[in-house]
Image (cartoon, rainbow, N blue to C red):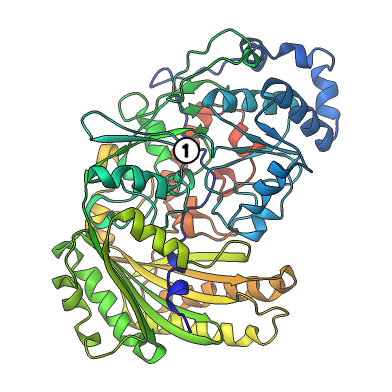
Amino acid sequence: MNYSPFLLWSLGIGILVSNAHIGVFAADAYVLRPLDETIEHLGLQQFFADIPELELAKTSLNQRCEKACHILSTVLPSEVQFPGSDAYTSNKRSYWAEQQAALSPRCFVAVTQPLSVSISVAVFRKTHCPFSVRSGGHSDVPGASNIENGVTIDLRFIRDIVVSDDKRTTSVGAGAIWGEVYMKLDPMDLTVLGGRLSAIGIGGLTLGGGLSFFSGKEGFACDNVVNYQASYSLPSQRFHDNINIPSIKQVIMADARLENVNQTSHPDLYRALRGGGNNFGIVTRFDLDTYPQGEMWSTVRSYRLDAKELLMEGLVIFNEHAADDPDLSVITSFVYVEGQWACGLICQYAHPVPDPELLRFSFESLTNTTPIQETTRISRLANLTGGLTSNNPPSGYRDQYTTKTYKNSIELQKRIVEIVILETDKIRGKLSNLDGFVSAVNFQGITSPMISKFSKRGGNILGIDLHEGPLLLVLFNFAWASAADDHLIIPASESILSQSNTIAAELGLLNDFIYMNYAGPNQSPFASYGRENLQELRRVQAKYDPDLVFEDLQPGGFKLNAEV
């Protein structure tokens, strides 16, 4: 039996769409360009001359989105994929979670440059056609990066990776995946803070916060974005004239302009984008802090379930002492797979040094326990994340993530694992299809060294203060094969979370934070950031997207106005 692939389930984080950044001309005011002016500026007015605005608004959703697809296929003929085509079918099948793959847009727009995104947004506004945006497509939240009967913008052809001359910044297209970035940087002995599986997309992970192997040293991925880059000066020619626009233009505004967003240019928007999800615009490039990095040491160790308390104790010790060596990353996992329970330890160290001292100290009680399986190696980051991806459960299954953050505790971990085992045992005999069934709970720290980096460049919007750490981030996860079992899995997932929260409250161990990239469809990550931060996000939204283009026309993902 091979346990280790499923112990890696917690690393499949890159979720949500890659649109969440916008720009502004002045720090105090942003004046949106009128829609008709935008349409004219883009040379699109001819496509709407035959249908008055009010008449268009009264047509059905299918009619509006069919018109949007028709216009886009005329303006961007090589970028639009219609149902029945091989490209459309392949696109649908490429999503990680079946809930996303099951959705059927009227068309995909596989954009090749930021300008195509601008055109698409303008057309969607004019036709009142709902849309979604895809980066890596690794979300399990229905509608986050695909849409039923709307239009999906696919960013995967915007994937340039450019290292600055001074090697301090790497500019990455929002359609790239982290494995491509690492393959570019590894030969240069460089790295960025990114996903822990090579197949994860850039956009969703970064916009939702973004845990990394290097978070102990530099914070979340969002804390290491220097700039969300774009240009708002557009040519006046029509875009079907095959204009070649450089791919350095990045953040698409609600009025289809392109802008740069950073701490100097637009500090309020820049802060909102550091954990604000897809509520502000569409990011097409991220400029990332870049750091020296050579070979790393990694181990994935599987144990029988009777070692569970040793793992729990070790993680609590590690979280408390993480400042002693912020180069070490640790996750523990408790998994039901292939008819058995197992537990595991997943560690990465930023140096080619086996079993670093902090790991030995933290998990000393585990020393005499022999793993039933172990994969340990020294390698580059691209190989390491590629290996984890190849062993990760495959795409094509249904998935349900939920999450909560608690104070660091051995007792709480024990109680949570007991709940997960009990609820899993209740339902597994009732499932109509056991193929690929996995139940897992994973624990990792949000440590004090991580939190200390959240204040970089004016701070992120996540609402975690240094005095709260170390915290225990918990990911609950189910994977299953058939929609016929949704009525069993989803209530079980909700029950596990509810019971865990109740026990944590009784023990005085609750923390508000909900990590967006692990959140379930019915959770409210923005409310967990705190009332003041939620109000700040809404102010930024009102300033830059007063018409709620990225709230209403782009309904998928976590929305500010849905939060209480």
- Residue 219 in the image: x percent, y percent? 28, 51
Q: Is residue 18 visible?
A: yes
Q: Position of residue 443 (x, y in %)?
A: 38, 71
Q: Quadrant of residue 488?
A: bottom right
In the picture shown, does residue 495 fall above or below 251? below
Label 1 crowd (10 A; few <14 / some 14-19 / many >=20): many
At x 47%, y 73%, the residue is 6
Amino acid type of the residue tagged 1 in the rendering: Ala
At a point 64% along the width and 43% down the height, the residue shown is: 555
Residue 51 left/right relative to 145: right
| Vertical position of residue 303 compared to residue 166: above or below | below
Look at the numbered disc 1 and give the secondary structure of its residue. Answer: loop
- Using the rendered image of the protein, determine whether residue 532 is visible from the camera's viewpoint: no
Q: Is residue 198 left or right of residue 553?
A: left
Please give the residue where the numbered disc 1 appears in the rendered image. Answer: 174
Q: Nearer the viewer, residue 419 or 285?
A: 285
**Relative image position of residue 160 (x, y in whole percent):** 43, 34
